[in-house]
Image: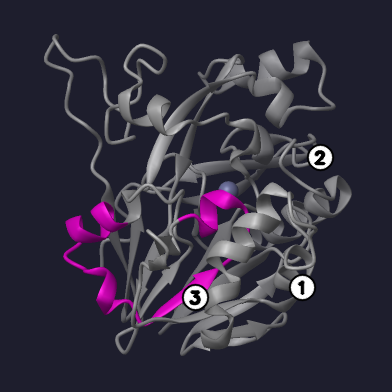
Amino acid sequence: MTTANLNLSRRAVLGGAAALPLVAAAGTPALAAGHGGGAAMPVARSFKLGEMTVTTLLDGSILRDGAKGIFGGNATDEQFAEVSAQNFISAEQAQFYFTPTLVDTGSALVLFDTGLGRGGVVTALAAAGVTPDQIDVVVITHMHPDHIGGLMTDGAPTFPNARYVTGAQEYNFWSKMEAGNRVGDLVASNVTPLAEKTEFIEDGASVAPGVTAMAAFGHTPGHMVYHLESGDRRLVLTADLANHYVWSFAHPEWIVSFDSDKEAATASRRKVLGMLAADRVPMIGYHMPFPAAGFVETRGEGFRFVPVSYQLMG
Ligand SMILES: [Zn+2]
């Protein structure tokens, strides 16, 4: 997902009680204060996966109008309304979540994606007891601004001791953009300065023991998801493979405005979600409702996202 269409301004996020009544000052959802409902959502949640600890980190969240235009480009209004109603959500609005994930492999702290660049990921890491200088590896799944925004803070690397890993195809695409391209410019300022410390990988590369890259192109030209394995436990970090937990699962073929190659994105969704459903492997999706972890089941011609309850506690 890209923030291109989110029209986020710093003022709207930080001070937008009027513009964004359901977004707390820190960018995490809370009910309007004054009726005993002002407590913000927690921003970090840890899961056990064999010897690994996997922690989802809520960098921010925002409520957006125009849900069908974003997630149901080729659906009819009736189809979109029906699937929404069946799943107890509005067909008009979507709550967006931005969720980097920290994986403690036992020998390294690996951070997957870095958020919007407003400090949310650092706050969430602190809630998990981790400081930025402790991060050993930063993996970038793809180079949309909501994933690379947190790489730099005031022009310096946010994670000063980290090495970096990202897809070669992804970097080759964005780093060749002409100046003036919004994503290309952010890649130039946030990714290229780190290139000497970056390993550019292909499909199937091992990032750390038990962590393997899998090509899932379509959302962007080099978008990758990551397979985690520890003991007999598996989990896939699906990044932006499927960006709404109802619409993109029920109808993987519905066009998502953020996907650069619509057909390839649909094919990747069907392939990876099909594998997760067949193997009953849990997933963490960057834009799923926090804490962003769930299972996948087949449902009709598509799939259904089943949020975790207490399955990954130990
Ligand atoms: Zn995204």
Label 1 sits on a secondary structure element that is helix
Image disc number at residue 253:
2
Q: Compared to 84, does 29 lie above or below?
A: below
13 left or right of 94 in image: left
Residue neighbourhood size for the residue with mark 1, other residues' Cα within 10 Å, grouped as few (<14), some (14–19), many (≥20): few
Q: Is residue 6 visible?
A: yes
88 left or right of 160 in image: right
Q: Label 1 is placed on what type of residue?
A: Asn
| Quadrant the N terminus occupies | top right
Of callouts 3 and 2, which one flags the residue occurring earlier in the amino acid sequence?
A: 3
Image disc number at residue 172:
1
Q: Is residue 296 visible?
A: no
Label 3 sits on a secondary structure element that is strand
Circle 3 sits on which residue? Answer: 228
Q: CA distance from mark 1 to mark 3?
A: 26 Å
Q: Compared to 243, does 176 lie above or below?
A: below
Of callouts 2 and 1, which one flags the residue occurring earlier in the amino acid sequence?
A: 1
Location of residue 78 (image quadrant): top right
Q: Specify start and end residues of the magenta stretch as a single range.
A: 122-149
Q: Which residue occupies the foreground of this view, 32 or 280?
A: 32
Residue neighbourhood size for the residue with mark 2, other residues' Cα within 10 Å, grouped as few (<14), some (14–19), many (≥20): many
